[in-house]
Image (cartoon, rainbow, N blue to C red):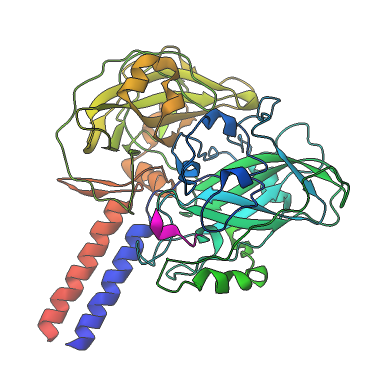
Amino acid sequence: MRVAMATTAVLASLALAIFVGQAAAHSWVGCTDYRGSVNYYEEDKCFAYPRQWHSRAPYAIDPKGYQIGIDTGFNYQPPDDPNGAACQAARGSGNYQTAYPKAVYEVGGTYCLAWPMKNHGAATCTNQYIPDTTLKIFMSGVNPTKDPTSQQFKDGRTVETFFGKHENGKIDCVGFQRSPKFCDNTDRALGTGCFKVAEDLSPGEYTFQWYWIFNPGAPYVTCFDATVVAKGSGSSNGVGGLTGVPVSNMNGDQDLCKNAWDSAATNAPADDADDLPDKPADDDDAGDGDGGDGGDGGGGGGGGDDEGAPPDTPVTPTAPVEGNTVQFTKAPASLPSVTVGPIEPVEVAYSAKGDDGAQMVVVVDVLAYGEDGEVSWYGKSSKRVNANTNGKLDLSVDALSKPLSKPATGMFVPYLKAWIVRAEDYDKEPAKAYAYELDLAIRHLKISDPDAADADTEADAEADADADAGTGAGAADAGGVTGGNSAGRAVQSAAMLVSCVLALVALLF
């Protein structure tokens, strides 16, 4: 009987691993020269920031630095195009401000980054199967005149880091999961990691890309710029570094992170991540209404028929979550070469949190990246929901404000963006409400020939969806669990597997 119980426990653990491995994820870098505590984020110890960080300000400073993890839509997944826009904001003069400057690094110096954990840490307060596929930093050549593409970043120079390589299935406090106080606040806890500016680097301007993969095929990136100066030139704030001793609460061993970090310099991330596909997923369904202009980074909105809240259905999160979340559960895999609408089916799972009696608005925008990272808006659908509810919404888009068509030349990457915002913020100015979004999810679309549009089978769409990861938590309805695209199917399969084992155990014992 003990053997049977052990077998069942192993299979249940495998089921959980399958489930968590398909969970959605998102994060970003919030400081590009962090010199503060390794346990809690200290805003005044941040000497440099990523592009457009000032767009999130002003924000209240939390005593434990949890403002770094507030969802404002800063997370970014590059499009499904090796030559597509590789950064969350286009190159330009408005990316930094006096209060939020770009970095200045000395040749040979060590500098540290800070990011929010967003529930993605293996610990006893979550479980040991939270994955972390890879974490790297890429960089451009000296004095670039334009941003590298995603492929050019990968083909270029990889920065030497001291992150360590996380071992899936283990609580180890390395890689992305370098967060000693993760269990204090799994959503907004501080993660940090350091890197070295190479000794042979020529002084000049550089662009860096923080590149993190949670689920294979679904990278999240943050770009930041730096002026690299000669060692000891006096032109920088000196060499960076973290302060304090990590005191871990991830698994009951307060020295877990300290011991792991001591060996991180010889535990560099493996190179196999470069061979992973970077394919985001596609889904099915959209909404109604017409609206305003798209904003920097892909906002958009205005107009639309907002409907009342749907029936309340239970949510089964893929990991402990706080706040508001959205994710696609259906969306088209491709569109005809010239699309005027409708775009359907589009279905979004949501979880809305807020004051009793408050309302939220869930929006789907139809957008496209163009040359130089410019974002164009084509249409939208939106619905209102009551706070403290969750479920699924049909947000199919009936008609577009202008044809969605690929130009003869130049980059063109259409996509759907789902986001959730407080109704009070949305109603102030719907066309710019994206600035207040609390969570978002992206689905890239393929443009096909009209005759070939019907060739995408449902199986193809599901396969594409499996390769993608949106943001936010999973959601469940009467039909079963859905989370991180294929998590629902994975959990159902795992549950069937465990059920079979239990049945076998009953027969044998």
Q: Looking at the picture, does residue 467 appear above or below residue 354?
A: below
Query: In the rendered image, which quarter contains the N terminus?
Result: bottom left
Q: Nearer the viewer, residue 176 or 373?
A: 176
Q: Nearer the viewer, residue 297 or 112?
A: 112
Name the quadrant containing residue 360: top left
- Residue 340 appears at what percent x and percent y? 40, 16
Residue at image location 41% in from the left, 61% down from the top = 130
- Is residue 361 visible in the rendered image? The answer is yes
Query: In the rendered image, which quarter contains the C terminus?
Result: bottom left
Farthest front residue?
63
Residue 188 left/right relative to 381: right
- Residue 143 appears at what percent x and percent y? 81, 37
- Residue 68 appears at what percent x and percent y? 50, 43
- Over which residues does the magenta segment extend? 179-185
Q: Nearer the viewer, residue 43 or 3?
A: 43
- Is residue 276 visible in the rendered image? The answer is no
Name the quadrant containing residue 246: bottom right
Q: Is residue 181 magenta?
A: yes
Residue at image location 53% in from the left, 39% down from the top = 80
Q: Nearer the viewer, residue 80 or 318?
A: 318
Residue 386 left/right relative to 437: left
Q: Looking at the picture, does residue 376 appear above or below residue 71?
A: above
